[in-house]
Amino acid sequence: MRHTADAHDDAPAHCRNCGTATAGNYCSHCGQETRLHMPSFMEFAHEFVGHYVALEGRLWGTFARLLFRPGALTNEYLAGRRRRYVEPLRLYLTLSILFFALIRFSGMSIVDFGKPAAERPAATAPAAEGSEHHTDLPTLVESGAPGLRHVVDRFDKLSAEQKGKAISDSFFHYAPYAMFCLMPLFALYLKGLYLGTGRRYGEHLLFALHANAFAFVLLAAFVLVPDGFFKFVLFCWLLGYLPWAMQRVYRKGKWGTAWRWFLLIVLHMLSLLAAVIVAMFLGVALAH
């Protein structure tokens, strides 16, 4: 008997995927279609767009709430309405990758060590050859990490161009991991700031993923938008977004939200600065 694609249109008594008895168009156990046929090109394209790019409403609904309704996406997820939106971790990772890719390919400078020595005025030129230059380190840091002096001195001997390249390479290699590892710490800060509210740690982590995903979008816009009025509007929205989201999700008053927001920003900025510095320093140390 000759088998064709049309022969597969007939619904079998059992699911071809898991073997469960079927009585409709979909398997009640695994969800696979019971009427199968060879897909056309348009069906392949539809599957790609629908499931991987998520352009069939999930992506647009997610971004609409993430960007323009602070805290609404977190509340939707906590309320159990999840299938209509992109998963929080996938959203964060996707926007993180796009942000760092944009920074890399935009040619944006991570650090600037100024002009090379040959272009500096004589008064600011480095000391004569044979003299030693050491970057000062706190005594406690130098005694606790004796190998740190060797790495710093080795970095000091690099040219301005080499220093910039070393830090830039280590930033793009390690900073995304460092920022991702800060998400649990960000959630822990929220847990401490909202003790007694009955919120579980997972709820704080969900809020952290959404808040930082929003930050990636706004920071990417800062790179793309030229200086002027629109960049000022973006800055104001970035500044006001987090306290608005906190108030909508945690339902505290304005003053209760304000002092928690201030402490959260201070703690997160210190943690972020420390993590990025350590990541960049680690990259420089391993590269030279």
Image: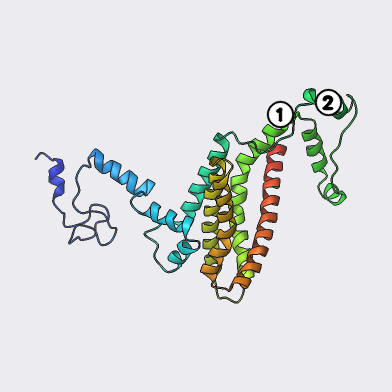
The kind of residue tagged 1 is: Glu
Vertical relation: 254 (above or below) 222: below
| Residue 146 lies in quadrant | top right
Q: Residues within 10 Å of mark 2 (few under 14, many from 20)?
A: few
Q: Residue furthest left?
A: 1
Question: Residue 70 at what x, y percent from top left?
Answer: 50, 61
Question: Residue 73 at what x, y percent from top left?
Answer: 46, 61
Q: Residues within 10 Å of mark 1 (few under 14, many from 20)?
A: few
Q: Nearer the viewer, residue 248 or 192?
A: 248
Mark in the foreground, 1 or 2: 2
Q: Residue furthest front?
A: 229
Q: How is the image coloured?
A: rainbow
Q: Nearer the viewer, residue 59 or 200?
A: 59
Q: Which comes sooner in the sequence, label 1 or label 2?
A: 2
> What residue appears at the point 36 percent right and 48 percent down from the top-left corner?
55
| Residue 120 lies in quadrant | top right
Per the image, the residue denoted by label 1 is 161
Vertical relation: 23 (above or below) 113: below
| Residue 265 lies in quadrant | bottom right
Q: Is residue 276 visible?
A: yes
Label at residue 211: none
Residue 142 is left or right of residue 256, and the answer is: right
Question: Residue 39 at what x, y percent from top left?
Answer: 23, 42
Label at residue 121: 2
The kind of residue tagged 2 is: Pro
Residue 269 is left or right of residue 100, and the answer is: right
Label 2's element? Answer: loop
Q: Is residue 287 visible?
A: no
Vertical relation: 121 (above or below) 235: above
State the quadrant of the C terminus: top right
